[in-house]
Image (spheres, rainbow, N blue to C red):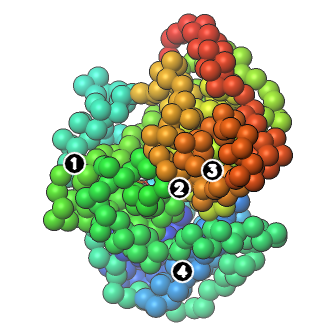
Amino acid sequence: MGTSASSTAPVIVWFRQDLRIDDNPALSAAAESGAPVIPLFIWSPEEEGNWEPGAASRFWLHHSLTELTISLARLGSPLIIKRGYSLSVLRDFAKEVGAHAVYWSRRYEPSTIVRDKNLKGALVNDGVDARSFNANLLFEPWQVLNAKNEPYRVFTAFYKAATALVTPPAPIDPPKKLVAPVKKVRSVAISDLMLLPKINWTMGLNDAWQPGEKGAKKNLEIFLDVLNRYVPDRDCPGVSGTSRLSPHLHFGEISPRTIWHAVRDTGKAGESKTTYLKELVWREFAHSLLYHFPHTANSPLRPEFERFAWRNDPDLLERWQKGATGYPLIDAGMRELWHTGWMHNRVRMIVASFLVKDLLLPWQQGAEWFWDTLVDADLANNTLGWQWSAGCGADAAPYFRVFNPVLQSQKFDPDGEYIKRWVPELSGLPKAWIHHPWDTPKEVLKAAAIELGKSYPQPIVDHAFARQRALEAFKQLKPVAAK
Ligand SMILES: Cc1cc2nc3c(=O)[nH]c(=O)nc-3n(C[C@H](O)[C@H](O)[C@H](O)COP(=O)(O)OP(=O)(O)OC[C@H]3O[C@@H](n4cnc5c(N)ncnc54)[C@H](O)[C@@H]3O)c2cc1C
């Protein structure tokens, strides 16, 4: 081992959340070195702190690893899979195969940053060339700082600074081939990781998604065709108006640079393009916040919220989780999530507001449920989304913004198409009543075969009352100095 290695000393490429061969700088650098390349994945959920991958993420990972194995085998060197603590697996494995280098793409979650720093030091001590690359962000979190060298807490300022900084570099092509190691290397089978659930609840996920790099490219292509309608359609959950690239981005099956350049280079100009690119920068903002404020995955960014008297009500929580709140749009969103592992962004904001403001349940309980059920569960984005909704994060919704689930439903799902898809027991209701079935005249309910309280629940809380209660509770919070 050592940096002056012979040409047969392999380079290990440690795959994590960069499950692709396209625009993967670590893989390309390894291939260009001319040395044999050993692609490696280590399953080590215990190292993710409180945030071990949830059930939907594990489902996705199983399929994504399967697809990556095929792509890498085609290039000449299949994926090797190991289990255990990354540090010991990497050190032992590097010794076993006589590797002179380990390359990987950076991750930005608090627990992985600590782990990776340690691990880099240990590998360098062993004489291994340990190198990390940026594969997953357009801008590194430490690049986008204000004049005082501090991180931004307001999105618009972050956006301006980030986009003035550099144009994200163009994506790089995948390697044409990989040199396989001379000696055969042992791997565990993907099925041995037991990522798929014992009870098969993933049929809806299977129908909705194609995990892996091919699925990511397909979603990008489909989206580019409707990109010019992003602005009018992106808030309507009944219309396929967004890119559905979030799980692919989370697992690194497509790079943000690839998306950025594909969108920027498409002929269709205008507001939709700018707005979409801005959404990609929200993702960057989320990563910057988590990087600079690592405690925020579990605690509020605004410290006064630590003292907020959240309620504890497992029954209400369960009604929310199961999509049985009696508010059709909320129930549609929660059922879409359970069934497909994804929920439309507008509906995520509304169900989150309902949990924290109408029910006064802690945002962390919502974040945990999303974590387990979303195929795009991402610590940076989920934390930003929940802290924004609770009003305790950076650039958050002010406390007096309480989404009205009926008005939101009438505005963004006017014909009730989304509700009918996910709450079929309401599909017989005319659009005048579908957003608030409790006001529906008896004969209309009867004609639609609905018995409130039996075939569909009564609302679990009165929104007007809950709004007032939330306003009073949140008003009590007095700002305290930030951490
Ligand atoms: C309470 C709550 C929780 C959320 N949890 C997650 C999560 O765990 N993982 C996740 O990827 N997104 C999360 N989001 C953000 C957003 O809802 C999803 O990224 C989006 O719905 C994904 O669909 P899309 O790919 O079709 O989005 P598009 O509209 O096509 O946007 C393109 C990409 O931009 C990024 N993006 C868009 N909106 C946001 C946003 N508000 N914050 C950060 N990035 C954004 C995503 O990577 C997305 O794939 C959450 C939002 C809320 C309100």
Mark found first going from the N terminus, 2 or 1? 1
Circle 1 packing at 10 Å, graded few (<14), some (14-19), many (20+), is some
Q: Secondary structure at mark 3?
A: loop
Amino acid type of the residue tagged 4 in the rendering: Glu
The x and y percentages for residue 165 are 20, 43
Mark 2–mark 4 distance (CA, rounded to whole Å) = 34 Å
- Give the x, y percent position of residue 154: 36, 28
Q: CA distance from mark 4 to mark 1?
A: 35 Å
Between residues 7 and 390, which one lies in front from this camera angle?
390
Residue flagged by tag 1: what amino acid is it? Answer: Glu
Between 257 and 188, the one nearer to me in the picture: 257
> How far apart, in angstroms, are the residues tagged by discs 1 and 3?
36 Å
Q: Which mark is residue 271?
A: 1
Mark toward the start of the polypeptide (4 vs 3): 4
Name the residue that disc number 2 marks: 417
| Res 179 seen here | yes
Q: Nearer the viewer, mark 4 or mark 1?
A: 1
**Amino acid type at image mark 3:** Leu
Does dot 2 land on a helix, a strand or a loop? helix
Give me the C-alpha separation between circle 2 and circle 3: 11 Å
Which residue is identified by label 4?
A: 67
The tag earlier along the polypeptide, 1 or 3, is 1
Residue 435 drawn at (x, y percent): 58, 41
Residue at figure coordinates x 29%, y 23% from the top left: 148
- Dot in front, 2 or 4: 2
Where is mark 3, residue-wise?
429
Q: Residues within 10 Å of mark 3 (few under 14, many from 20)?
A: many
